[in-house]
Amino acid sequence: MKDRVQVADHKRTIIFCYRGFAANFGTRHVVASILEQAGHDVKQIKDGPADFSVDSVVWIWGNTNWYPGLYAQLAAMPRAQRPLVVLWHTEPLPLPRAAGLPWPRLNWWETAKFVLRDSNATDVYTNYLVLRRWVKQGIPDVLVAATLGRCEFLSERGIAADWVPLGYEPSYGRDLGLSRAIDVLFLGAQDVPRRNRLLRSLRKKGIQIEAVGSYADPSCWGEERTKLLNRTKIMLNLARTSGEFPDLRLILGMANKALVLSEPIYRPDPFVSGRHFVSSPIGEMPGIIRYYLAHDAERAAISERAHRLITQDVTMEASVRRILDLISTRANQRAAVESAVRSKRPLRHHEVD
């Protein structure tokens, strides 16, 4: 692997906030582990309130809606006493106008969670509205979005965000050299009406699909997931909403050299359709599936290119290093502002946002 996080020149105290599914099993998040390997002092929590100082960094993974306790704590603090807060937003947001797609309709339980302001809500509207509330409070100091589409959507609403994609990490899988006996696999939640409709339509056209999607199923995690994907020829991407970019699903398929076949994605950068995955409208998927099942060499060539890209260039270590650079830049700007206030001198151009 080409990119590794170097040992930090400046050791930071980082409170890493993660309330995803793996946290329920007491699992250390890969980013927290990478930060520790780089020499930082890292404590992982699920939500606030947390014990930190103004010199700490609070690194939030995922979605602001997951952390009501942390928000209440930070919003109640004077800005000058807050730690530096970075949010790596990895969850879906509405697509920007340039995508040319209608905003998604919520199903009944998503609507109920939205109305009740449930912290378990994951619909795109809740994700955006809660993030906007944080931004109005001056939180976070560094906002990073994992896809270009989310950056564009936020920019349309006057919210600046840097693009740092999710990347490959060895726990996501590797090539085991197994016989690929599963023709077509879908890995993901099965309780999504749109997704179920698409799966049914493909099956009605004669496509045999193995679907795995319960978060309690060990096949969704760890070494069992790696073995499952290594036995798969084609891995489907069927999103919750049209145009959505579920980046981690693509990375999982590529890590294990399964060909990823996806419905069209808005701004799938850094991946390129036809080179790293195959894109197809649902109506054309049966023919595309049959083609690549019959052409092993072409299928393997795309899978190899994708695997090489993520393991050499699009790595989690490289993305973490990029965010650490953004943190350093913002910390230096904050220090310059505080120094100028104390000395009552005017700020230089490079010292402000």
Image (cartoon, helix red, strand yellow):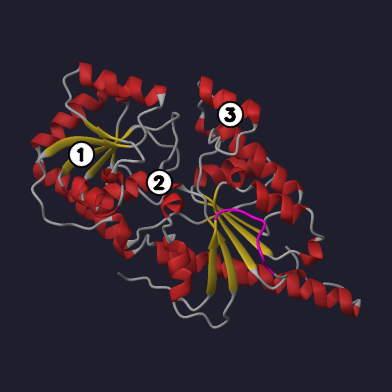
Q: Which residue is mark 2?
A: 247
Q: Which residue is mark 3?
A: 113
Verify whether residue 218 appears in magenta.
no
Q: Nearer the viewer, mark 1 or mark 3?
A: 3
What residue is shown at x 9% (from left), y 40% (from top)?
181
Q: Position of residue 276 (x, y in %)?
A: 28, 48
Label 2–label 1 contact, CB within 8 A? no
Is residue 190 left or right of 143 when viewed as pictured?
Answer: left
Q: Which mark is residue 234?
A: 1
Q: Does any portion of residue 103 appear in the rendered image?
A: no
Q: Position of residue 265 (x, y in %)?
A: 40, 36
Q: Which residues are magenta?
A: 46-52
Is the magenta region chiefly helix, strand or loop?
loop
Q: Position of residue 232 (x, y in %)?
A: 17, 42
Q: Position of residue 86 (x, y in %)?
A: 61, 60
Q: Amino acid at mark 2?
A: Asp
